[in-house]
Image: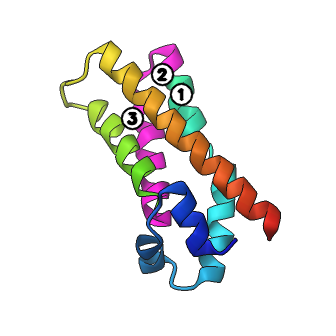
Amino acid sequence: MTVQELYANIGGSYENARRILPMDKMIAKFIVRFLDDKSFEKLMTAHESGDGAGMFEGAHALKGVCGNLGLTSLSEAASAVAEEFRPGKARTMDDAALSAHLAALKETYEKTVEGIRAFAAEQ
């Protein structure tokens, strides 16, 4: 599987990744490292414990990592959560809407991780 095929499979933006990482070899190296990133786990743990500050930190970190790697769907979903819990800003989602949003984010995350693992296994 090529890097371009990976991005097509996971719904990412290869073009956005190329803006930050100009060579496929670099993209491949860093996309596999995404598997070690703990931002998603931090976000979900914070959600389970009702820690708004932790949710902001996890979502904000996830948004940044995903944005740099061209994982646009995941970055946008994380951004919505980060904005929901940005310090000093009033929440706009009720708990049910937040739970639904996080469930969709989790589904996207799992699909992304599954695709990256398949890509890594072929390298």
Helix, strand or loop at disc 3?
helix
Q: If the image is split into quadrants, where does the N terminus sit?
A: bottom right
User: Is residue 88 in view?
Assistant: yes
Q: Residue at x 47, y 27 (%)?
A: 103
Pointers 2 and 1 in contact (CB under 8 A)? yes
The reply, left or right, for residue 104 in relation to residue 111 is: left
Q: Which residues are magenta?
A: 47-70
Helix, strand or loop at disc 1?
helix
Pointers 2 and 3 in contact (CB under 8 A)? no
Q: Residue at x 31, y 20 (%)?
A: 97
Above or below, 105 relative to 62: above
- CA gap between label 2 and label 1 equals 5 Å
Residue 56: image x %, image y %? 39, 35
Above or below, 63 relative to 45: below
Residue 6: image x %, image y %? 60, 65
The reply, left or right, for residue 123 in relation to residue 94 is: right
Which amino acid type is shown beneath numbered disc 3? Phe
Residue 118: image x %, image y %? 74, 57
Query: According to the image, label 3 marks what residue?
Result: 56
Q: Residue at x 45, y 15 (%)?
A: 50
Q: Quadrant of residue 41?
A: top right
Above or below, 46 relative to 29: above
Query: According to the image, label 2 marks what residue?
Result: 47
Q: Quadrant of residue 96?
A: top left
Query: According to the image, label 1 marks what residue?
Result: 44
Which amino acid type is shown beneath numbered disc 2? His
Q: Is residue 90 magenta?
A: no
